[in-house]
Image: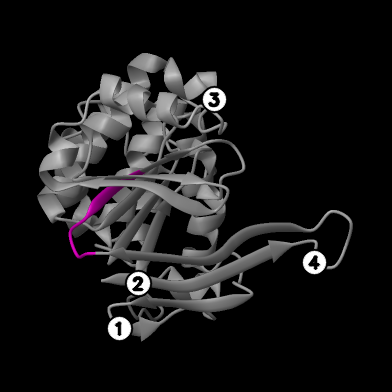
C-alpha cells in the first residue's frame, strides 16, 4: 500500500551542522495497517510523516502509495489522498468559521464546485449524526465558531473532518500530546473507532507507550532514522509494557525514549 525505499534525508547539508535523518530507510505498510510509531526525540518520526505528506522533499529514495510515486508531489497534491492530524488542535480547522462551515469545507474536499453556496443545508443531518458519535455535544453547536471550542473538541472535530474524505492514508502526528490526560483518552477512543470503522491505513506517532501498545496491529520504533523494532500481528497483540521495557534494558546504551514516554 505504502512503500518507502532507500529514503535519504539530510538537513543543513555540507555545513558544520549537517544532520542525516534517514540513510536508506526502507518501510512497507500494508493496506489496513494501523501502525503506532515510537522513538526518542530526533529519531525522525515527524520528519517521516513530513516526507510522506509532501511537506518536505526527500533528498533521495522513492515513496509510492498504491504503486504510484508520490516522492516529489507537493503537499497540497498529497492532501487529496493523505489526511493528517497535527499535535496543535488549531492546525486542522479554521477558527473564524463555524463548525458547520468547517465541516462543509471538509465534505467538499476534492470535489468540483461552481458558483454555489459552500454550505448545503441538506448535509446538516449527516453532520449532526457524525458529531453525535463524539458524545461532546458538538451536534448542537453547529453555528459556533471553532475558535471558541476547547482543544479536545477541536481535535475531535479535526478527526471527523479528516475521516470524511476517506483518505487512502491517515497520518496522526502526536495528536493527543497537547491535551490533558482525560481528553487525550477520549480522542484515542474516537481515533480507534474511526480507524476500525473505515479500515483506514494509519500511521500514528505517540510518546505514550500505553497508547502505542493498545492501539493498532503493528508497532515500530525509530532510532536515529532507523527502524530498530517492528512488532506486528499476534506478537503485537501480546505486547506488554514489561516486554517493551525488557527491550529498552537490552538496548540501554541507546537513548531510545524519554522519561515522558516511559511514564506517560
Give SS at disc 3: loop
Residue numbers of the magenta segment: 30-36
- Between the residue at mark 3 and the residue at mark 4, the CA separation in whole angstroms equals 27 Å
Examine the image and state in which quarter residue 250 appears: top left
* First-in-chain label (3 vs 2): 2
Q: Is residue 83 above or below residue 237?
A: below
Examine the image and state in which quarter residue 143 appears: top left
Residue 83 horizontal side relative to residue 123, left or right: right
How many residues crowd mark 4 within 10 Å: few (<14), some (14–19), many (20+)? few
User: What numbered label is drawn on residue 258?
Assistant: 3
Disc nearest the viewer among 1 and 3:
3
- Between the residue at mark 4 and the residue at mark 2, the CA separation in whole angstroms equals 25 Å
* First-in-chain label (1 vs 3): 1
Question: Where residue 147 sits in the image (x, y, percent)?
Answer: 52, 35
How many residues crowd mark 3 within 10 Å: few (<14), some (14–19), many (20+)? few
User: What numbered label is drawn on residue 67?
Assistant: 1
Residue for badge 4: 13
Name the one closer to the observer, 71 or 117: 71
Cβ atoms under marks 4 and 2 closer than 8 Å: no
Give SS at disc 2: strand
* First-in-chain label (2 vs 1): 2
Residue for badge 2: 3
Give SS at disc 1: loop
Question: Where residue 200 sits in the image (x, y, percent)?
Answer: 21, 56
Question: In the rendered view of the protein, which quadrant contains the N terminus?
Answer: bottom left
Task: Identify the residue shown where x is 48% and y is 38%.
Answer: 39
Q: What's the image's color scheme?
A: one colour
Amino acid at each position: 500500500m505504502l512503500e518507502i525505499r532507500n529514503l535519504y534525508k539530510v538537513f543543513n547539508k555540507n555545513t558544520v551542522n549537517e544532520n542525516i535523518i534517514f540513510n536508506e530507510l526502507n518501510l512497507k505498510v500494508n493496506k489496513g495497517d494501523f501502525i503506532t510509531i515510537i522513538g526518542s526525540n530526533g529519531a525522525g518520526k515527524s520528519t517521516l510523516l513530513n516526507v510522506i505528506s509532501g511537506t518536505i522533499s526527500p533528498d533521495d529514495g522513492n515513496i509510492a502509495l498504491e504503486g504510484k510515486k508520490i516522492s516529489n508531489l507537493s503537499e497540497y497534491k498529497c492532501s487529496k489522498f493523505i489526511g493528517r492530524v497535527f499535535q496543535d488542535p488549531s492546525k486542522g480547522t479554521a477558527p473564524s468559521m463555524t463548525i458547520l462551515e468547517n465541516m462543509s469545507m471538509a465534505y467538499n474536499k476534492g470535489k468540483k464546485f461552481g458558483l454555489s453556496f459552500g454550505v448545503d443545508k441538506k448535509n446538516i443531518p449527516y453532520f449532526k449524526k457524525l458529531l453525535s458519535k463524539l458524545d461532546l455535544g458538538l451536534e448542537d453547536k453547529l453555528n459556533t465558531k471553532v475558535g471558541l471550542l476547547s482543544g479536545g473538541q477541536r481535535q475531535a472535530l479535526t478527526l471527523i473532518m479528516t475521516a470524511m474524505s476517506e483518505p487512502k492514508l491517515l497520518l496522526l502526528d502526536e495528536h493527543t500530546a497537547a491535551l490533558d490526560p482525560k481528553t487525550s483518552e477520549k480522542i484515542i477512543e474516537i481515533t480507534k473507532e474511526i480507524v476500525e470503522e473505515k479500515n483506514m491505513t494509519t500511521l500514528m506517532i505517540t510518546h505514550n507507550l500505553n497508547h502505542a501498545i493498545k492501539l493498532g496491529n503493528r508497532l515500530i520504533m525509530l532510532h536515529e532514522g532507523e527502524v530498530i523494532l517492528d512488532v506486528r500481528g499476534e506478537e503485537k497483540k501480546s505486547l506488554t509494557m514489561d516486554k517493551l521495557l525488557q527491550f529498552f534494558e537490552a538496548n540501554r546504551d541507546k537513548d531510545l525514549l524519554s522519561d515522558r514516554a516511559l511514564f506517560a
